[in-house]
Image (cartoon, rainbow, N blue to C red):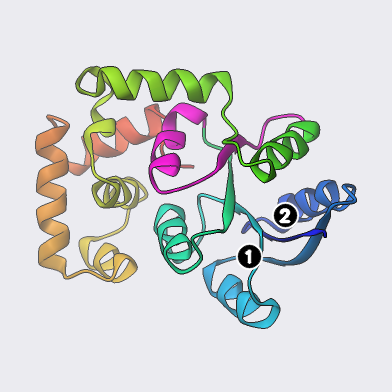
Amino acid sequence: MALKTIVVDDHAIVRRGIVQILSEHSDIEVAGEAGDYGQLRTLLRRVGEIDLLVMDVNLPGKDGIDILKTLLGEMPRLKVLVVSMYPEEQYAVRAFRAGAAGYLNKAGAPEKLLEAVEQIVAGRKYVTPEIAQALIENLHAPEQGLPHERLSDREFQTLKLIATGHRLSDIAEALALSPKTVSVYRARILEKMSMGNNAELTHYAIKHSLVE
């Protein structure tokens, strides 16, 4: 039986490329594609339960890590391969903590996509050498890592939104939080990262490729 798969990416050209690569595999049935979380929910209602989700971590409207946690809470058997333009060391650890079965950099060769899918379908995690190194470093010495690695997932989301110029009210709306709560997150971020203002956070995020 073919693997029922959905591809989610907000860049239509990239999404179509992923669909084309997956369609070349005889055991994969691409049941649909979506550009954001809302489209994904609509698609899931139409096609029903799926086996595999190939998803970009950076989507408009809702953070990819949050989406991952939500979907796996509803469909525990779902396998999720996260694809991203961000380097493995930036997001892979968070993705695996949220339940991803694999993480793939979009800069990789097309055959790596099929390799990742085959490993995940076989019940294994797809881990590149770069991800393995990041996981080991995070496991054994998280306190020695980069400052942003000390942040919770919600704090990390807040950092990215601050760094892309969003106001606290915009961040509150995007994350479905109160402005007061966002202010608390901002204060925690500044404290954990030993920084004094939003400009320093923005400079750091750009320097470490945390934002596009």
Q: Amino acid at mark 1?
A: Gly
User: Where the N terminus falls, by quadrant?
Assistant: bottom right
Is residue 188 toward the left or the right of residue 25 in the image? Answer: left
Question: Which residue is at the front of the view, 191 or 100?
Answer: 100
Query: Is disc 1 surrounded by few (<14), some (14 to 19) or many (20+) residues within 10 Å?
Result: some
Answer yes or no: do the residues labelled 1 and 2 have beta carbons within 8 Å?
yes
In three-dimensional space, the C-alpha distance between marks 1 and 2, rounded to whole angstroms, equals: 8 Å
What residue sits right under mark 2 in the picture? 15
Task: Estimate the x, y position of residue 97 in percent, counting from the top left.
Answer: 38, 42
* Residue 196 appears in the rendering: no
Point out the tag, 1 or 2, that comes first from the N-terminus. 2
Asked if the stretch drawn in magenta spans residue 58, the answer is no
- 6 horizontally vs 137: left or right: right
User: Which circle marks residue 35 in the picture?
Assistant: 1
What is the magenta range?
87-109
Q: Along the line of sight, which residue is nearer the eye, 198 or 11?
A: 11
